[in-house]
Amino acid sequence: MAKVKTYAVKRSERRVPLEVGVQIAGHPDAPAGVERTFTQDVSSRGARVRTMQRWQTNDRLLIASQPDFRATARVAYCQPVWGEGYAIGLEFLEPAGQWIIAPAQVQERTLNG
């Protein structure tokens, strides 16, 4: 019997459990076009968001939050949650404005240093 290799994708950042009000748009079956919802956890590069719509992996959507954050995002996963709806993992592709968590500072190494 052949062995199947599985690979775990390790996050480059830890997610922080935090509920942030967001709007998501772009689902082809959403009647109103925009869904107001909340995050379950966040990082500077993405978020886990509760939604009533079923999304497909790699779908693109728009996410916005107060006061001025907007981003195109990729759906990394969509999981049914207990009760109603789904949880989607989002990867921010084109963020603009101030998100709730700022990107980590890149430490530059010098040749002399």
Image (tube, rainbow, N blue to C red):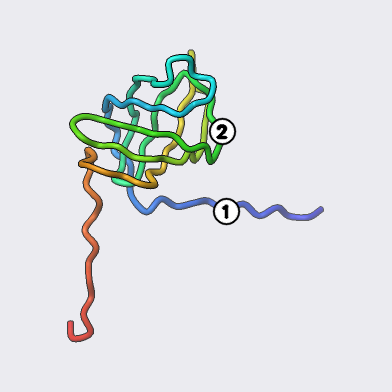
Q: Is residue 111 left or right of residue 88?
A: left
Determine the secondary structure under disc 2. Answer: loop
**110 or 63: nearer the eye?**
63
What residue does disc 1 label?
Answer: 7
Is 15 located above or below residue 88 in the figure? below
Whole-percent x, y for residue 19 in the image: 28, 27
Whole-percent x, y for residue 70 in the image: 29, 37
Can you name the residue that lies furthest to the bottom here? 112
**93 or 16: nearer the eye?**
93
- The residue positioned 45% from the left and 52% from the top of the image is 10
| Quarter of the figure that contains the C terminus | bottom left
- Mark linked to residue 24: none
Whole-percent x, y for residue 5 in the image: 66, 55
Task: Write down the quadrant of residue 20 in the picture.
Answer: top left
Determine the secondary structure under disc 1. Answer: loop
- The residue positioned 33% from the left and 24% from the top of the image is 38
What type is the residue that disc 1 sits on? Tyr
Is 51 located above or below residue 8 in the figure? above
- The residue positioned 41% from the left and 50% from the top of the image is 11
Q: Is residue 22 left or right of residue 5?
A: left
What residue does disc 2 label?
Answer: 56
What type is the residue that disc 2 sits on? Gln
> Which callout, 2 or 1, points to the residue nearer the camera?
2
**Neighbours of disc 2 within 10 Å: few (<14), some (14-19), many (20+):** some
**Neighbours of disc 1 within 10 Å: few (<14), some (14-19), many (20+):** few
